[in-house]
Amino acid sequence: MDVIVQQFFDLNVMRDNFGLIWDGFQQTLLLSLIAGGLSLVWGLVVALLRQLPGRAAAPIRWLTIAYIDSFRGIPLLLILLLVNGSLGALNGDPLPEWLAVPNWFGEPYQFWYGIFAITLTYGAYMAEVYRAGIEAIPSGQMEAARSLGMSHGQAMRQVVVPQAVRTVIPPLLNDFIALMKDTSLVSFIGFVEVVQAGQDVYQVTYNVSALTLGAIFFLICTIPLARVVDWLIARQQARYQRGGIDGPTPTETTSGPLGGTAGA
């Protein structure tokens, strides 16, 4: 037992390398926030492109479906390695250096390669979450909006999407938790985040306590987020449960934001 405590929970190793691990975790947080925000926006754009109506938009819909299926089916690590191996090779022809080897805001190109790969991958996952939310909205909402003279885009922007986003917040948070953990894969292309920092300490001390400290940092962030997801799910269930305190009124369940016309 003493050997396990010394190997995994050596307080001296944690104390001596706290600053290094914390700096790495700050990079992990920055990766998570930027990639998470971009994935949310990109996923919504892809979901809306997939919902475009009409025969003329069929090629766009098929392209979005192909994109979603492809990036959901390929491991993030492989996408990361493909981005890392391709963008640098395209430097100067055909891509300009500022895009092929970005060092924006003082961050190294490995950081931005990680952002690109994570956004492309999780954007596909989040697009499917958004699509599920959009398709869960009763079709009468769109019909009522169109009957009031709104275009398809206006109806999506003002009526359907706001309702859909509210319903998919819990699964989006779950995806963000997964995204945050997957940022550790960026260490494979040489970027020093919390996992790579812990691994560097291990190679010197042959003790994994620094990695344990990194795991604790992750738990401090992910466990509260998981409880927020549980709370949001319980709140949604209470709203839609018949007779619940927060349950919608009969008018709300049939009409939504457009009044009685939505249920017509």
Image (cartoon, helix red, strand yellow):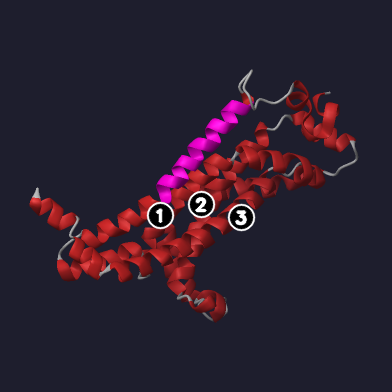
Q: Compared with residue 35, is residue 263 higher up or lower down, i.e. above or below?
A: above
Q: CA distance from mark 2 to mark 1?
A: 10 Å
The residue that disc 2 covers is 122
Q: Quadrant of the C terminus?
A: top right
For image coordinates 62% across by 55% down, the residue present is: 41
Q: Compared with residue 183, is residue 55 higher up or lower down, i.e. above or below?
A: above
Q: Taking the image as drawn, is residue 253 in sight?
A: yes
For badge 1, the amino acid type reads Asp
Q: Answer with the quarter of the image where residue 180 lies.
A: bottom left
Which region is colored magenta? 221-239
The x and y percentages for residue 218 are 37, 54
Identify the main secondary structure in magenta.
Answer: helix
The residue that disc 3 covers is 42
For image coordinates 49% across by 71% down, the residue present is: 87
The x and y percentages for residue 158 are 78, 44
The residue most toward the left is 2
Q: Are marks 2 and 1 in contact (CB under 8 Å)?
A: yes
Q: Which numbered disc flags the more N-terminal residue, 1 or 3?
A: 3
Q: Helix or strand or loop: what does disc 1 sit on?
A: helix
For image coordinates 40% across by 57% down, the residue present is: 78
Q: CA distance from mark 1 to mark 3?
A: 18 Å
Question: In screen coordinates, is 182 left or right of 229?
Answer: left
The residue that disc 1 covers is 182
Q: Is residue 231 magenta?
A: yes
Question: In screen coordinates, is 227 left or right of 51?
Answer: left
| Residue closer to the observer: 212 or 116 | 212
For badge 3, the amino acid type reads Trp
The x and y percentages for residue 16 are 23, 70
Q: Mark 2, residues whose alpha carbon is within 10 Å: few (<14), some, or many (≥20)?
A: many
Q: Which numbered disc flags the more N-terminal residue, 3 or 2?
A: 3
For badge 2, the amino acid type reads Tyr
